[in-house]
Amino acid sequence: MLFTLSWLIPALAASVLGESSGSSTFRSDPIIALRKKGISVGRLNAIALGLIDGDGCFCSLACDILASTIGADSVSLLGEETYASSRAKFWSQQQSHETKPKCFVRPADPEEVSITILLARATECPFAIKGSGHTSFKGASNSHGGITIDFVQMKHVVPSTDKKSVAIGPGNTWFDVYTTLETFNLTMAGGRTATVGVSGLTLGGGISFFSGQHGWTCDNIISYEIVLGSGEILTVDSKTDAALFWALRGGGGGNFGVVTQFVASTFEQGPMWGGFLAWEMHSSKTALVDAMVNYAEKGSLKDPKAALIVSFAYVQLYQMWVSSLVVDHLDPQPHGSHPEVFDEIFNVENAFQDTTRTASHSNLTVEVANASPPGLRQSYWTITTRLDKQFALDILTIFQEESNPILNLTSFLPSFIYQIIPVSQLKAMTRNGGNALGIGGGEEPLLLISLSPMWVLGSDDRTVLTWCSNIISRTEALARERGLEHPFIYINYASQFQDPLSSYGAENMARLMEVSRKYDPDGVFQKLSPGYFKFGGAPASWL
């Protein structure tokens, strides 16, 4: 079978003439680029000439060349012990059990990332990027039948000499970052869950315990190191590549290149205060929603050092509806006391759990991580609305109504989560040229709503996903009816059936696509890395 790769004709002409094809600064012929890096391209030329029949799939060849180029110890093939180990290290069952890449590649530096991308292009083999693998849906950061680039070997955390910034490798979790920074009495505005990866959270925005004072994680990035589809390696900041810098701040890195290092602002931080509180839901929900709204409208403005997450769930083990809050404050508190901003919450009677204490930043994120363990089936869905107390109570009723018929699904844990995006965070999003999220500078707090169910049986997928879809649809309809709708869909909480990038607004979407066309003119990340959120709409269709 004659298989003609899309770049073949200009590639062969350029190869004969000894020059690069294409006129764009960031356009390249992968074979020429690989040859310049000293990689043998004989077998790749044979593919292009139709001398090797692979029925259109040459991922095995790409994996073989990678093993011989960057080392067999850095490439795992199906059947190898290291392959099974790599495949197991994803948060959700959908990614670890149902997704089988042709190989895992563990690059040690940006140059090896560049080689991997060029080989994927030369063989037209799809690829995915894994930081910590905390995305829920199949194929998001694990390539079925393709190459999964696993950043497990790129985990440096290096504070600057003046201790005002830190260089972070893309394979780190937030626990890795915080425990390193704490040895210098430092931290940064990063994720709140110890096991979540730096890359995905940061490129999607990133809410932090410190966001009231410092904004979202993406607002605290000073520079990015990124490998483009052309194989070029750039360092990007607000001055060198302002448009790309803006796009990477919330626009999702998978549309522009592969980020191989983040440099973020740091600040001094010792022990802080926080923990979990829990009540029986029916007796506490009205008072807690009251407290949440008051926090959004007054408390968050008065005390930006505070952070709050409000969750409602059904716990099968106890056959009990539960209200669970995460409360945090940047200042340590005397034993048995709490910050004034949370007085209304602590006045709610009959809490059966209170883990609040003064502890390290890293320790508090471990507690959050323990609430969402790996190895289960997972899904995230989200919607944003304007803030209204009665609306928050009414959609909680929708959550219960939709949940009641399926509460006995095997090991099913339905949860419904409220988070406030206060005005202080919206204002912080305008710094350093702003970010791509489309909500910066807002004058009123927003209510970020998310569904995060956990379950164990694949046979229950359709039931659970239908449950999610129904709750989101009914919530959207009620928000429209009451004039509370808002377009923003937070990409880090979005399901594969949602389209967060278009929610950033037509102007921002157009800017993002323009940046993508400039830095990825060959469309490498739209065509060969399709698993996560792209410009063409939701990754999957809901039937």
Image: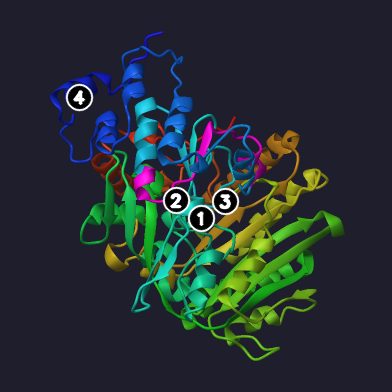
Secondary structure at numbered mark 2: loop
Q: Which of marks 1 and 3 is in front?
A: 3
- Residue 281 in the figure: left or right of residue 169: right
Mark 1 or mark 3: whose residue is earlier in sequence: 3
In-front residue for pair 258/379:
258
Secondary structure at numbered mark 4: helix
Q: Distance between the residues labelled 4 and 3?
A: 41 Å
Residue under label 3: 134
Label 1 close to label 2 by CB (< 8 Å): yes
Residue under label 1: 384
Identity, as a three-letter code, of the amino acid under mark 4: Ser
Label 3 close to label 2 by CB (< 8 Å): no
In-front residue for pair 358/30:
30
Image height check: is 506 above or below 58? below
Give the percent coordinates (x, y) of residue 357. 67, 82
Q: How far apart are marks 1 and 3 (CA)?
A: 22 Å
Mark 4 or mark 2: whose residue is earlier in sequence: 4
